[in-house]
Every structure is written in structure tokens, then in C-alpha cells.
Image (spheres, rainbow, N blue to C red):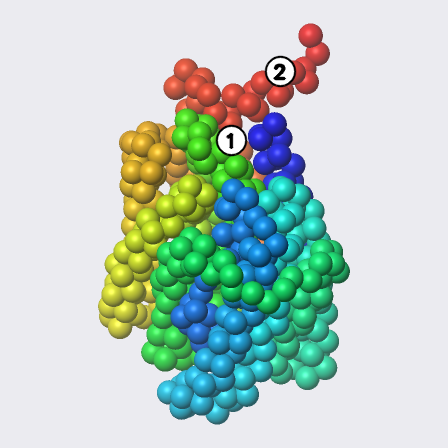
Amino acid sequence: MLKMMILRGTAWLLLGRFVSQAIGLASTLVAARLLVPADFGLVAVAMSVFMIAGAVVELPVAAALVQLKTVTDRDFNTAWTLNILRGVIVTVLMLAAAWPVAAVFGDPRLVALISAMASYPFLLGFRNSRFEMYIRNMDFKWEAMIEIGTKVASFAVMFWVALATGSYWALPLGLIASGVIALVMSFALCPQIPGLSLSEFRKFFGFSVWLGLAQIADSLREATTSLFIGKLLGNAALGTYAVGIQFADRMELFLYAPMERTMFAAFSSIQDDLHRVRAAYLSSLHASFAISLPICVGIGLMAKEIVAITLGPEWASAALVLAFAAPITAIYLLGAISVSIATALGRTRSVFFLKAVSACLYIPVMVVGALQFGMIGVLWAGVFGAIVWCGLSFRLMAKVIHVSMVRQAAVVGRSLAAALVMSGAVTWARSSLFDDPAQGITELMVQAGVLSSLGAVVYLVAHAGLWIAANRPQGIERQVSDRFAALSPA
């Protein structure tokens, strides 16, 4: 029953995420064609201010509403009030930071840009807290509808402003439009208005404070990287970095976020049965990595073709960012499952220490890398950070649900080995079959099609071969094999 609920919920969120991320990708591609890298860099600086301001008063009350075993009207009222207060505080902090940040970067346009973007957290603060009842009931279709609605609104506004003016204002105005739609739809789909109350503040604070601190670590990590690149390498370099990272972020949002939402709700419902949690974790770890790793690695291998086809030659430097960021995304997904389980089990303090230690180890390496080697140093620091993150997350699960790090590594071993074989085959084919770099769009598409098809076949064959060599253990390979056997005529 629980497995079917997870699959059904994930299916709805995958549908919503597929549509919304397709629209989001189209938005990025259109904006990249109509704007220049420096525009993206300018907006990335403003977004970093939003991330830091939001992190200072982060209190993820929505997660608390889902994790609570029972929830009352007073809980919804307190959650709504806390979100409103947070939105107001973040808005004030952003307004206060607008002029100093503009002075540091020597760009007065940041004052108006940051001030305008301050309306986004204010809008989100008023979202209906009662909407989380759908998540508690594992009814995710309405969340999918909101996600699609916000992306449509954002794309429409961004496209119209970019086409009409060619201005970087297309990006923040699209973001603000998505906030308006998210607010309106949360009440339209759940027309019950919460009240203003802080009666259950201690309950939310006890659960959410550590998650809030953990998100502060995440936000500081990402914002520090963006601000450091912008200040050291300039807005154009930051713009290409931001666009390359957006491709990877969209993969993460599509591949993992739907599963994370359903897994968090599901693990919360079985938090008292550690045996079931342990089995579900290993199964999720194995299946998600087997699916996400070849996609992420494949996109990294095809980074040059993808950027050249979708963005054009002026964005060529974004290909290097994507080549690093895409495989890194798959590594981060491993740790993200650990975070979902630890949060569902109420081990939010452990989640904070995981993210804080990871950020503390990454940021100095990133700074040294950027100072010594520029952009390539930042990217290699990202590889280091991902490996540290994965190791720490495995250690967290060893402590929380008593699964050894060796066993966790074993369930992803076949996928990692198959991906390495795939990478070798694609690299060899590129050097052997395509000696001269492709120039035209048609030639690029043919080259990408041949290499990606080869990579997919090699990965599947290698994965299946390793599974057979391991004497056909339980896993996603067995499920696929059984499904084909069931479909075959007797």
C-alpha cells in the first residue's frame, strides 16, 4: 500500500515537474538568446542576496506540518503566521542590503533590482499553510498543478518583457509573477484561510530550527560561490556559471525533487518501523542512482553539443560548467535521500551538522581554487564538495538507521561501474568518429544523437552484465527482468 502511494505520488509530481521544468528550460533558453551573460550575472548577484537574507530567518514550517503525527487548526495558524513574519523580515533585509551590495559591486542597477526582488519572499510568505494537508495525505496532484501554473506565468512574463525590451528585468519580473500565481493558487485549491496565531510556536521551533540552520548552510554555500565568482571574475563569468548550473539544477528538480517529497511523506508515516525505513532507503538509493547517474553523466558528456545547440556560440564557456555540474548532481542526489530520511525521523540536528560540515569544508577549497585557478578551480572544488557530501551522508545513515557505509556503497556500485564504462565508450567514440569539431546545428545534433545512443546502450549492457555476474541479486534489474518476463508470451 505504501509503495503504491509513493509510486502514485511520484508519478503526479514527475508529471508536474516534467512540464514545469520543460517550461523552465525553455525560459532559460529564450532568455539566453535574448539577453547576454552579464545580464544573468547581475540577476545572480541579486538572487544571492535573496538566498542569504532568506537563510538568516529560515524556518521550514511546511516540513514540520508534514512530519507531525497529528496536526490541528492551531498548527496551521501558527505555520501561516510564521511564514508571513519570515516573508516580511526577508523583504526588509533585502531592502536594507540593496545599496551596500550595489556599492560593493560598483553597479547602481542592483539597488532597484534587489528592491524589486524583495517582493518575492513577501508574496510567498502569505501562501496558504493548509495546502500542506494534501502532502500529508500524499495527494500530490495539486502541488503539480501549482508548479505548472507558476512556471507558465513566469515564462509568459519573462518572454514578453525580454522580447519587448531586451532588458535583464525580464528575469526578476518572471520570478515575481510566479510568486503571485503560487499565492493565488494555494488559496484557490485549498479555500480555507488560516488565522493569525503563535500558540504552537515552540512545537514548530523545536522541529524546524535545525532544518532552518541546515538551509542557512546550504544558502551560504551557494550564495558565497556566486558572489565570489561575480566579484573576482566579473558578471559575464558569473552569468555563464549561473546558466550552466541552471541546467544541472533543473535535472535535480526533475529527477529527485518529486521523489523527495513523496519519500519524506512516506518515511514520516513509517518512522516508528526502523526495519521498513532501512529497506526502503536501500531500495530508493539503488533505484534512484541507477536511473539518475546515466542521465547526469550523459548530459555532462554531451555538454558541448547541448550548449552549442540550445544557447549558441556566445555561451560556449557554459559547457565546461555543465560538464562538471551534471555528474556532480547525481552524487548530491545520494545524500539528498539521506536528508529526507533523517528529517522524517526527526533527526534534524544531524541534518544541520551534515550540511554545516560540508559547507565549511567546501567554501575554503572553493575560495582557494578560484583565486589560484579561476573558474576551473571553482568547478573542481564542486567535485570535492560533492564527494565530501556523499561520504558524510552515508555516515549519517550509518548512525541513524544502522546501515553500514560499505553496504550503502555496494548498492550503487553497479551503476557507478556501468557509468564509468559508458564514459569511456563515449569518449573513445568522440575521438575516433568525430575528429573535427562539428559546426552546424544539424551536424551537432547528429553527433549528439550518435554519442548519446551509444552511451545509453553501453550503460544498459554493462549494468545488466554486472548484475548477471553478481548472480542476479534483488534490485531494479530484477524488477525490470520480471516485468519483461510477465509481458512475454508463455
Which residue is found at the position 42% from the left and 53% from the top?
A: 207
Amino acid type assigned to the residue bearing label 1 in the image: Leu
Q: Is residue 388 visible?
A: yes
Q: Does residue 470 appear to the left or right of 384 in the view shown? A: right
Q: Does residue 161 appear to the left or right of 307 in the view shown? A: right
Q: Residues within 10 Å of mark 2 (few under 14, many from 20)?
A: few
Q: Position of residue 51 (x, y in %)?
A: 45, 70
Which residue is found at the position 72% from the left and 76% from the top?
A: 160
Q: Which residue is mark 2?
A: 485
Residue 460's mark? Answer: 1
Residue 451 drawn above or below residue 197: above
Residue 333 drawn above or below residue 95: above
Q: Is residue 30 visible?
A: no
Residue 73 drawn above or below residue 286: below
Foreground label between 2 and 1: 2
Local secondary structure at mark 1: helix
**In this orientation, which residue lies closer to the viewer: 442 or 229?**
229
